[in-house]
Amino acid sequence: MLLGRKYRKPIVIPQKNVKQWKYTTCNYCSTGCAIEIGVDEAGKIVTSRGHAGADVNRGKLCIKGILEHELFDSPGRGSTPLLREKFHRPFKPVDWDRALDYSAARIRDIQARRGRDSFAVVSTGQLLTEEFYTLGKLVRGCIGTNNYDGNTTLCMASAVSGYKRSFGSDGPPGCYADFEHTDCLMAFGSNLPEQHPVIYWRLQETREKRRFPLIVVDPRVTMFAQFADIHLPLVPGTDCVLINAMLHVIFDEGLEDRAYLLAHTNNLNELETLVAEYDPKRAQKVCGIDEDTIRTVARLYAGAGAAMSIWTMGINQSTHGSDGVANINNLNLATGNIGKPGGTSLSITGQCNAMGTREWSSCSGLPGYRQLENAEHRNTVADFWGIDPEFLPKRRGLTQTDIFPAIETGEIKGLWLIATNPLTSMANQPRIRRAMEKLDLLIVQDVYEDVETNQFAHVYLPAAVWAEKEGCHTNTERRVNLTRNVLPPYADSKSDFWIFREMARRFDTNPGIRFAHTPEETFEEMKLLSRGAGRILDISGMSYDSIEAARGIQWPCSEAHAQAWRDDPGNLKGEPRLYTDGKFQTANGRANLIAVRFVNNNECPDTHYPFWLNSGRVVEHFHTRTRTGKIGNCNKFSPTPYMEINPDAAAELGVQHQQYVRLLSRRGDAVVMAQLTQRVPRDMVFIPFHFHDCVNRLTLGLLDPHSRQPAFKQCAVRLEAVDQREAARLNSERRAF
Amino acid sequence: MATTNTALSNSVATAAAGEATDCETQKPLWEIRSEEQPYAFLSDSGNERQNRYGQAIDLLELSGLPAERSLYINENPAVGSNPHRNKQHGFFFTADNCIGCHACEAACAEKNETPPHLAFRSVGYIEGGSFPDYQRLNISMACNHCDDPVCLRGCPTAAYTKHAEYGAVLQDPDTCFGCGYCTWVCPYNAPQLDPIQGQVSKCNMCVDRLEVGLKPACVSACVGNALDFGVIENLPPNREQASASIPGFPDPQITRPNIRFQQTRVLPEEMRRPDAMPVKYHKDDKGRYRPLVDRRKQAHAGGPERRWNLARLSSRENPLVLFTLSSQAAIGAVALPLLGALLGVESLQQFQHSAAYLPLAIASLLLVGGGLLASTSHLGKPRRFYRGFNNLRHSPVSREGLGIAVFIAALALHILLSIPASGWARDLLGGTYGPAGAAIAAPAAAVCGVLAVAAGLAGLYYMNRCYRIKARPFWDHWQTGAGFGGNTLSLGALLSGSTIVATLAASGADYRQALSLAGALLVLGLALEAAGLAAHARAMASAEHEGAASHYMQQTAFGNTYLLRNGLLGLNLLLAAALLISGIDGAAALAGWTAVGLLLIATSVIGRALFYVLVIPTTMPGAFFWKNKGFEEHAREIGLADMPQVGVVGSR
């Protein structure tokens, strides 16, 4: 009491009274942070904290993770199954048996009338791996539709495709620890501080100890771009030209790692021939980065002892996303930067378990990175599941982005959506909305009853969320981590695992198929499928207990790794990197160099639609805001949609800061609030993608030919003045949460 | 001070002895995470003895208090193990590194369980340059636990304490009555007034974590390595600069805040705010960023063109418009006849003995009483009004309140004691006083009257002091005093003058002397106010602070209203002066002075409302939605604010 009163005032600070800390992994993005949830004596969740001993986050969490434990009883949770014959009638609450019986009967009916593939299933990257595996088994082994995909097609499909084309298999070859070893880091269309703050922190920690060049390629001046040593504000959609020009300089000046190329790659000639055409003198006119800078960056990257590339949606969400990934792989193969500490091609994934769905959901193939096109793989899985191999299709069916057009054309009549919200997330909303109206059966399985897609549902199945369930996630660096069950599911909602098992009971297509009773048993089952010589996706050395003890284990982690722990219990880990021996998952064990020719098929700005429309995330929201939009201390930082627009462009149009503007594209319109900032160039506007009835009313979403991922970030719009009062009314009407 | 300290140390010693037996069952002040990382622990190595302002960092040395005292956090008697617990601590903000990710704010909100519309820590930003040579500077700001805590000095309820432990400035929400004065004086927006709870709360420095050697929750959560914390003037490892300010940060001389900055990146010469405040920051020749008017800001101001915005004159501070004007009018109205009579002005002595004297005094009493009631209703917790006098030692609000309270009490006594001298009241009450009582009543009434006037003037002085706030440069000008004094003269003269002149005229007495006197005081009051306003406008127009932005708003968003008030005030001054000099009487005078009176009331109300709505504090820059007054207003207008997760308190 230095100043103030003679007598002490009480100091009251909220006390959490934690009785027990329970181990979980964050359910938002793919960083894979370990979170401990604190429960009090009554078993009520009172707080949470980052796990200080987990290697991924070392105690840190981002805003979403810090407040994540508040979501369990947030408004809008589904409490009981709902049913209606037509989507324009009101829902009636029903019990689970009725909801599931009805759903199964309608699915069978549609399939009987229109063929097995007339019913489609679209899942997510948000479930637990055991649930993905169970869903895959249900869809591939019981329901038997080939039109089954995940919403990961909207975010990671290009990375998967690019990895497969280059290395013969999916699977990011690097890890976060590579930051500690790299001598040059190049980020393509990745804004770590906003999208993956904890990965950014890992990078920042190493940069505080040791400076190395950071190059950021992004058409906006993001915080990452601002803190980079070199920022390349390239023309949207021209990253292939930039990389080809870099490769041109590297080959031209003999900076490549020729020994590595000759020993470990295919198609060197094709690549060299193609990039010879991409002289920086010509490339600069296309990609907007001057030739000197291209040469500087190419020399810097090739000259670094170890150099690594990271990328996110700036690459993936493009009409040549898969090519972009392959080209980044080309760059790293050419400079010998694959499979070595600090040298890697690391895709920074989006959803918490995008990796889990890629590995185990059977969406694009069969579990454990197996392919439908491979007879041996089909036989293995069919044998393991106890089904007829002929029941499995011989090639992959439609992706999520092709399923909606197939609804439009009438090929698909029924759809089961699991933890995904296409009525906000898909490009070209007017078209999606019309397609949804045409469905005979739409089952929406989601944590939230107020998820926008539910407007068109016939059956709504309320799902449990995150720590109401138990199971694993795999993060960006292939680390499998565990979420322990902390509390029972909300009201009469059920875990997705339970829903899949119950649905499976209602299909007797393959009587031999059996489903494990618990997620942990399922994990043990998956381990059996993961074993095998030469397989990289090997989790057979893990168990729930060892995962928790190690706070996450990276695959490959074989029985041999498990034996090593028994000898040295302090050393509980899998392999941090893939392809360290230069052997790849291709037929001849060599990586494929893929010559990527730039074709400009984007809807570029013109006189009628003079602005690029760019979209992306903000740190306080996740995806379609169904969770973060209800957590006040997240949502308050951007409670309504807005648009970044350059003040010079705004002045020309008479648009003022904090006024509403109407945007028009060739698809539809949207109303947003203008934020005048020099962060964006004069011919571009940027809108966060999280908001319902907003940016995706405008986007075109041309598809990548390989990955079928939409180009969310490149299309053209124009701006028009709008009556401020009307716009304000529209804005508040469109924000139900 | 010495005796207090001894008493305190004794009580602490007794408490410690008493609680020793409970120690086994005692819970730790904070549970340290298993495998806690080094970044979370305080790690002070510096040996600075004094801070840059020459103040001792060792607070025991500064205060003479004993060591090892418990903070009794949540009534827990444990004494923290932190070896530096009696040194002044502060935040260290590496602006070079802040990515604006909100992790600090979220960690703070989670730990302190603050609702979305409050935040003990907030991140705002300023930005400048042009694409792609663009830079954004994020600023994360909480309480700076200042050497000179203006919140503590200002708080009338004495809810604040600056502790010798860590130098933490802590506030007790259970003492607070929600007047919000601390939110006016703090330049950093640290105290958070919750309109729902009706009280203030603020950053508690996470003293529970500090006691076990951990940095505050916000610091531990930072993922940009921007926030740090430790003994003040200690440079954290790997940092090279400890500046007292960064662009967008108010003048540190106001409070000597305990925060240091590293900001080595060269910024564009002009940095703008994303919120609706028409303020930007421009680099001067010494490299400092000075606040300037941002004439491009339009949404909030409604455009650079002049507008009326009459509806926006009505604000949360309406009760204060009422309170200040009515108390000024009442004090003026009481003082004029009373002092006039004492000074031997014949017509006023005559009035004092008339039947109308008591009604005027009673009307004044009701006026000031009503104003006080209005200002009390403006509190978050009006039933705690009596705590307003807790901080006479430091707070001008307490002193203002005391002055007005004594004015009311003395005036009431004066009224009671004046009854025997008043014909009708004496008749009404019969012989209550008796002849002896009546004999001593007159001098006692005079004493009470003088006391009332003295207390009233003292109250007015502190009322003026209340608004001379460095963090509100629009108010921190002699115009505030001139306005208050001017209104005391003009409104007081209007109220009492009209009563006196009417009374004298009705009784057929000569009222011209009283009319000239009241008229002269009214003209003087108007002239004083006008002179203050003219000087204020000149000062604000050339100022390099938020006052200039207020003045810009005054000329644009409220431009027509402002011009109307100025025009009416000037016209009124001319009219009143003409009436005074011409010395006319009769019906013409009645009409003329009635017009003056009406104009005076109109200009006073408009002027005082403008005074409150226009002030722009020197607070930290906000963001596009969060801490943006423009968006908050908009969210309330369109109903978005009705959803609690928007973080804006809806219209109550």
Image (tube, coloured by chain):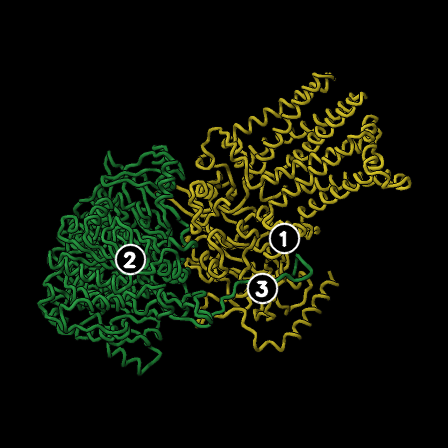
Q: Quick check: do tags 1 and 3 share a chain?
A: yes
Q: Report in which chain the residue with disc 3 lies.
A: B
The residue pinned by badge 1 equals: B152
Amino acid type at circle 2 is Leu
The residue pinned by badge 3 equals: B47
Colour assigned to chain A in the rendering is green
SS assignment at label 1 = helix
The residue pinned by badge 2 equals: A82
Left/right of residue B58 with respect to residue B643 in the rendered view = right
Q: Nearer the viewer, residue A525 or A103?
A: A103
Left/right of residue A244 with respect to residue A269 in the rendered view = right
Amino acid type at circle 3 is Asn
Distance, label 3 to label 2, CA atoms, is 68 Å
Colour assigned to chain B in the rendering is yellow
Hey, which residue is sitting farthest right in the picture? B436
Left/right of residue A296 with respect to residue A512 in the rendered view = right
- Callout in the foreground (1, 3): 1
